[in-house]
């Protein structure tokens, strides 16, 4: 049973203040995070979305495009060009599934696997930049996942 927040019947005009908006706090934090990653990923030749795709593949090589899209919450229209660029860079290869030609599998190349070694220090650099303790970041991550789940299930 989900609990519904109590919303006052009279909404003060200050509720329309940008600084009080959860959406803006999330949006601006996301922009800051992406900006933080940019110089760390440049030596790897990756954009932030490409890095996220590589994280999934470093966890479990040889996944379907559908699985990758589900993990990243991206549709195929966004994911396909990203994968084409990773393939052009020699980091992944896309192959039709032998059992089902409709499915495309994504596999790391040796260069893609090797890139994970170069990326090892990035999470620690990000943790340092947050100026938070590991348990604080872990708790924040769990709260954001719960928020995402709630928002995903919320009626439009």
Image (cartoon, helix red, strand yellow):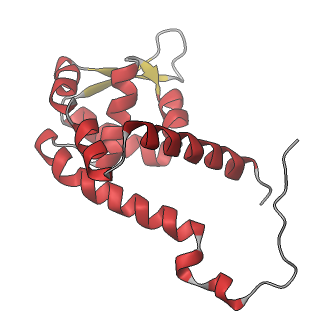
The answer to whether residue 72 is above or below residue 110 is: below
Q: Residue at x 37, y 42 (%)?
A: 133
Q: Quadrant of the N terminus?
A: top right
| Extreme-left residue of the structure | 43
Q: Is residue 7 above or below residue 155?
A: below
Residue 138 is situated, as x and y percent measured from the top left of the image, at: 47, 37
Number of numbered callouts drawn: 0
Q: Which residue is at the far top?
A: 99
In percent of width and height, residue 88 lies at 21, 36
**Residue drawn at x 33%, y 23% as measured from the top left:** 58
Residue 19 showing in the rendered view: yes
The residue drawn where x is 52% and y is 40% is 139
Q: 117 or 130, which is in the foreground?
A: 130
Seen at 37% across and 63% down, the residue is: 31
Asked if residue 11 is positioned above or below residue 136 in the image, the reply reads below
x and y percent of residue 24 in the render? Answer: 52, 70
Q: Which picture quadrant has residue 125?
A: top left
Answer with left or right where residue 85 lies relative to residue 72: left
Q: Is residue 23 left or right of residue 44?
A: right
Q: Quadrant of the C terminus?
A: bottom right
Q: Nearer the viewer, residue 20 or 52?
A: 20
**Residue 122 vs residue 98: left or right?**
left
- Whether residue 74 is visible, yes or no, is no
Q: Is residue 145 left or right of residue 44?
A: right
Residue 77 picture location, percent across and down? 48, 47
């Amino acid at each position: 049973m989900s609990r519904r927040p109590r919303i006052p019947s009279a909404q003060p005009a200050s509720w329309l203040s940008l600084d009080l908006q959860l959406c803006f706090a999330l949006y601006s934090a996301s922009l800051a995070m992406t900006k933080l990653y940019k110089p760390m990923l440049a030596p790897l030749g990756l954009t932030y979305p490409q890095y996220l795709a590589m994280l999934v593949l470093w966890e479990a090589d040889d996944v379907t495009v559908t699985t990758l899209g589900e993990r990243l919450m991206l549709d195929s229209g966004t994911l396909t060009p990203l994968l084409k660029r990773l393939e052009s860079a020699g980091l992944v290869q896309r192959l039709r599934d032998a059992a089902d030609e409709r499915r495309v599998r994504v596999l790391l190349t040796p260069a893609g696997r090797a890139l994970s070694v170069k990326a090892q220090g990035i999470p620690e650099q990000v943790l340092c930049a947050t100026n938070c303790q590991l348990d604080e970041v872990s708790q924040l991550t769990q709260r954001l996942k719960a928020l995402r789940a709630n928002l995903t299930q919320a009626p439009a």
